Image (cartoon, rainbow, N blue to C red):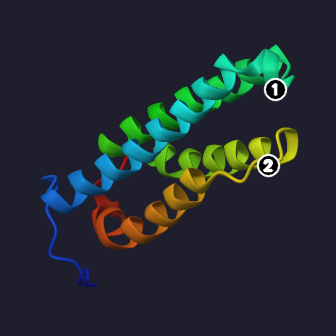
Amino acid sequence: MEEYSYFDEDPKKGWGFILAFASLMLFTIMGLGIDVDEYLQHEYLNIPRWYFYIIFSLDILMMISLVLMFFYRKIGIFTFPVLLILHFFMHNYYLSTFLYTDVTNLFLFTGFGMLAIIPKWKFFK
């Protein structure tokens, strides 16, 4: 049976894929900046130190999953939204803060995923 391809794609990363990756990384770094700001004020805000071990680990793992996504690894596509949602809920539950960077990042992941990532799915390992 002949394989049908709805996308005329090649494994080369185009501008759409690179811009999608850059925007996801930008908002992930912005979330890291918010976490650093909270860490600098943790004594004033009475945030326990153990919280930052977890939240910075999540930030680093999100960046690693984005890099894996850039190099066509499926594990990056599966772990990034899970880590992002966990990051959002930790901020919401422990600090009662609603992070718009996380919501925007999730929106960008789903939006750009449809336009840039899904057409290249057959190249992911």
| Left or right of 7 on screen, residue 33 | right
Mark 2: which secondary structure? helix
Give the mark count. 2
| Left or right of 48 on screen, residue 75 | left
Task: Say which mark, if any, is on residue 25.
Answer: none
- Read off the residue under disc 2: 92
Residue at the image position 70 percent from the left and 21 percent from the top: 41
Q: Nearer the viewer, residue 7 or 114?
A: 114
Residue placed furthest toward the front? 44
In the image, residue 75 sits, relative to residue 118, either above or below, namely: above
**Residue 73 visible:** no
Residue at the image position 34 percent from the left and 52 percent from the top: 23
Which x, y percent locates residue 72?
32, 46
**Residue 37 visible:** yes
Which quarter shows the N terminus? bottom left
Q: Residues within 10 Å of mark 2 (few under 14, many from 20)?
A: few
Tag 2: amino acid: Asn
- Tell me the distance, in whole angstroms, between the alpha carbons under discs 1 and 2: 15 Å
Q: Nearer the viewer, mark 1 or mark 2?
A: 1
| Left or right of 26 on screen, residue 59 | right
Residue at the image position 29 percent from the left and 47 percent from the top: 22
Task: Say which mark, if any, is on residue 45.
Answer: 1
Q: Is label 1 in contact with label 2 (beta carbons under 8 Å)?
A: no
Quarter of the rendering containing residue 54: top right
Q: Nearer the viewer, residue 31 or 118?
A: 31
Which x, y percent locates residue 122?
31, 61
Tag 1: amino acid: Leu
Q: Residues within 10 Å of mark 1 (few under 14, many from 20)?
A: few
Q: Nearer the viewer, residue 37 or 85?
A: 37
In the image, residue 41 sits, relative to residue 88, either above or below, namely: above
Residue at the image position 20 percent from the left and 62 percent from the top: 16
